[in-house]
Image: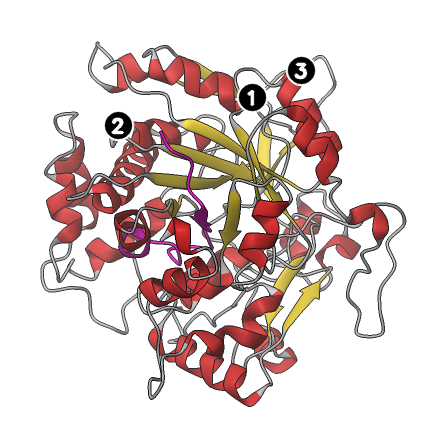
Amino acid sequence: MALPTIIQGGMGIAVSGWKLAQVVARAGQLGVVSGTAVSLVLARRLQEGDPDGRMRHALAHFPVPGVATRVLDRYFVPGGKPEDAPYRAVPMATLRPNPAFVELTVAANFVEVFLAKEGHPGVVGINLLEKIRLPTVPALFGAMLAGVDYVLMGAGIPRAIPGVLDRLAKGEPADLKIDVEGAPVEEEHVVSFDPAAFCGGHAPALRRPVFLAIVSSAVLASTLARKASGRVDGFVIEGDTAGGHNAPPRGPLTLDALGQPVYGPRDVPELEKFRALGLPFWLAGSYGRPERLPAALAQGAAGIQVGTAFAFCEESGIRSDVKRRVIAASRAGTARAFTDPSASPTGFPFKVVGLADTLSEPETYAARDRVCDIGLLQRPYRRDDGSVGYRCPSEDPGTFVAKGGSLEETVGRKCICNGLAATAGFAQVRPDGRVEPVLLTSGDDVADVARFLPPGRDTYTATDVLARLLAAIPAAG
């Protein structure tokens, strides 16, 4: 498999959906779907009536009998739910997930990858977060059932994932260790998935996808290359200007005058050490500029990963009205991303774009009831009786404290799950009629996305982005 020059970032909840990934893959680069909350996305698309029929089309190709029928029975609403009606909840991830959760997770990841790959020979990847571990194994199996070509994972140290891919490819059961806060060292917790049991007794042999770890340092890359549970095929080296979660700065945390973490020389990737590993790598974080692609190639990179430029193109999953506002702000020179040290319940810095009527604004943040009903970033913890509970610093502070958490840990936390779902047009409606507000994340390059606009246009396409980036290296065209 030839290495791609451009990897389209796997962003947010449904931002990097199948439509965007398919366009990029058709163009000969690596199109990537976001695996974050795709179960929620499939369920909500079906509840909206699946107006273009694409979800039902993909489910009709799901290879395990009965699963698609049960998913449709639970979530499909012919004609769509009323606009002011809430979405039906989907099961939360736990250490012992119920069968409905597992079926929805496998089916949703299959659907997203199947549609991204349909009708062309290009390559498609899926991006998952190490910090969202509970649904990872069935998510990977669903993507592999659809023939996913690459798996990309960051936001942590994904040492166990290569081995999980190896086992799933052979149809063998796979476990993933889960950290449970407060549990003694000798107490082990795992989530387990058995492909054969899921498939009714016999699991198919599947192609093992290429695995790329998303890292910020050569030390982490070297550790993964030597000590991962299986083969690591390459790295995406992500800098602190990339969107979403950023790695914390090395050393003591220092904030600038705006309240953002300060990154220094220790946070600059040592590319000579990456080159010494002998594995391909791609550079990410403000690389969506034509001049940066040849510069990356000159430093030994196989290419670049680009997120922000694709996030605001026509094919991305961000709501059209939000994209228009951001592009207008970029044109006006006012678009900015703020690296918020407190927003994410993970404790990692998280980029938030300043935009009126979104969770970036104090008034909107204060007016929102702190409800945790998606729970992707909940943390398992050990109760006094030895059972496992789940809590999130972004939930209601009183609830979090009642579960044994500290009040200090809740300060400034934002509900990333609901906010990102709203950004993609899947905002939950609350009993009092209020609608979950948008939380928009993006890399620092959001300031300049207007540069991709063709003359006389107010929007641009993924093809416009690719053409502009690849023009800097005519041979690649």
For label 3, the residue is 187
Q: Residue at x 12, y 35 (%)?
A: 61
Q: Is residue 11 magenta?
A: yes
Q: Which mark is residue 145?
A: 2
Q: Nearer the viewer, residue 233 or 83?
A: 233
First in sequence: mark 1 or mark 3? 1
Query: Disc 2 marks which amino acid?
Result: Leu
Residue at 12 percent of width and 47 percent of height: 56
Mark sitting on residue 262: none
**Separation of marks 1 and 3 at Cα, in angstroms:** 18 Å
Q: Is residue 135 left or right of residue 74?
A: right
**57 and 414: which one is in front?**
57
Q: Main secondary structure of the magenta part?
A: loop
Q: Position of residue 220 (x, y in %)?
A: 70, 31
Residue 326 located left or right of residue 183: left
**Residue under pointer 1:** 160
Residue 252: x %, y % from top left: 90, 49
Can residue 167 be seen in this snapshot? yes
Category of crowding for the residue at label 3, using alpha-carbon neighbours closer than 10 angstroms: few (below 14), some (14–19), many (at least 20):
few
